[in-house]
């Protein structure tokens, strides 16, 4: 299993993601540049967080037309795995690999803090290794993380178990108070119908090093490679 | 022929516009409390070379649908003017 982490102009979580996948988890990681026209043999593509193209026009809009995105879309359409964190999630929504969109937080503030998450189901690679009663403490850092989809699309997403993680409180209750940005149904992340493309606003790579005092993020990243590790 | 498009992109009416809401409350601070329902969008101008106004309109529409606006969150409208 080889990961490929894409750097767009303005990405700023690419090195964190590479560090966790390579140094902490021991996987081979290909560094990919937005102008590349090949995924260089990577099996699992990661779009990291940041402010690609300065968030010009809309978060993720311009990056979704980067040269490498043609390859990412072809890879995903072939069943290849893709994960987008934060701005990576926004890029995947803009490129229509994931349903819905991410609006400005309802309170109009950039929010950087630890929040709690729980897996909504175990239907996808990204949550199948996480118990439904587990509460994970993971940081968020975004201004546009309010997941939105029109009613008909939202009910399809819910019905297909495409919600991968929801915001909850420290006891695991999914409440309005635990919703950090006004996102619909406390949605923190979703996947596509094929369950091979995942997007989430929280940053598991920022909670994956023992020296930082929190490795809950590793639970999510290890779920992705569970089949490989077993 | 060259045309100039003036494009307005607005958040969908049904959606909360936190930016507009923040500005509405800030206007109260400068004693303009009678102003309400501020909504903030984008105004984009662009120039386009096309053999007819219909083709220019079609291309601008395509630009709006594919990149300039996201139909899940925004609506757009534009006017076209022949400039040369």
Image (cartoon, rainbow, N blue to C red):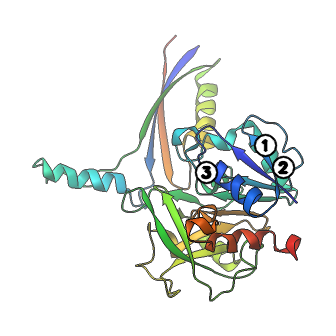
User: Residue A216's image quarter?
Assistant: bottom right
Chain of the residue on which disc 2 is drawn = A
State which tag comes first along the sequence, 3 or 2: 3
- Disc 3 sits on a residue from what chain? A
Which chain is mark 1 on?
A
Q: Nearer the viewer, residue B57 or A138?
A: A138
Asked if the residue under mark 1 is in contact with the one under mark 2, i.e. CB atoms within 8 Å, the reply is: yes
Q: Provide the residue designation for mark 1.
A: A70
- Seen at 78% across and 43% down, the residue is A70
Q: Is residue A130 above or below residue A213?
A: below
Mark 3: few/some/many CA within 10 Å (<14, 14-19, 20+): many
Mark 3 against mark 2, which lies toward the viewer?
A: 3
**The C terminus of chain A sits in image quarter:** bottom right
Q: Which residue is mark 3?
A: A13
Q: Nearer the viewer, residue A213 or A157?
A: A213
- The location of residue A81, given as percent across then percent down, is 81, 60
Up-down relation of residue A22 to residue A174 (above or below):
above
Image position of A49 (left or right of A173) = right
Q: Nearer the viewer, mark 3 or mark 1?
A: 3
Residue A74: assigned label: 2
Density class for disc 2 (Cα within 10 Å; few <14, some 14-19, many ≥20) is few
Q: Residue A76: name its quadrant.
A: bottom right
Q: Is residue A110 above or below residue A35?
A: below
Residues A211 and A130: in front is A211
Q: CA distance from mark 3 to mark 1?
A: 22 Å
């Amino acid at each position: 299993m080889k990961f490929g982490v894409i750097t767009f102009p303005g990405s700023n979580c690419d090195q964190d993601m590479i560090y966790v996948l390579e140094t902490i988890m021991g996987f081979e990681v290909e560094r990919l540049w937005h102008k590349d026209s090949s995924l260089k043999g990577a099996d699992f593509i990661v779009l990291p967080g940041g402010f690609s193209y300065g968030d010009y026009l809309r978060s993720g809009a311009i990056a979704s037309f980067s040269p490498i995105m043609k390859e990412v879309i072809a890879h995903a359409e072939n069943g290849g795995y893709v994960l987008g964190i934060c701005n990576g999630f926004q890029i995947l929504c803009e490129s229509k690999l994931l349903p819905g969109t991410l609006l400005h937080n309802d309170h109009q503030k950039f929010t950087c803090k630890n929040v709690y998450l729980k897996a909504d189901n175990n239907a996808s690679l990204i949550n199948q290794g996480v118990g439904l009663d587990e509460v994970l403490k993971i940081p968020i850092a975004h201004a546009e993380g309010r997941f939105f989809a029109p009613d008909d699309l939202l009910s399809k997403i819910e019905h297909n178990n495409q919600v991968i993680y929801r915001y909850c409180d420290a006891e695991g209750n999914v409440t309005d108070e635990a919703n950090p940005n006004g996102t619909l149904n406390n949605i923190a992340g979703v996947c596509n119908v094929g369950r091979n493309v995942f997007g989430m606003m929280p940053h598991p790579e920022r909670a994956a090093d023992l020296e930082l005092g929190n490795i809950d993020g590793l639970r999510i990243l290890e779920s992705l490679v569970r089949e490989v590790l077993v | 022929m060259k045309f100039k498009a003036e494009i307005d992109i607005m958040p969908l009416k049904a959606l909360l516009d936190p930016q507009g809401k923040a500005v509405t409350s800030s206007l109260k601070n400068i004693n303009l409390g009678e102003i309400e329902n501020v909504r903030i969008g984008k105004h984009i101008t662009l120039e386009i070379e096309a053999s007819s106004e219909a083709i220019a309109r079609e291309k601008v529409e395509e630009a709006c649908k594919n990149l300039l606006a996201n139909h899940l969150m925004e609506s757009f409208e534009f006017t076209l003017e022949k400039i040369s």
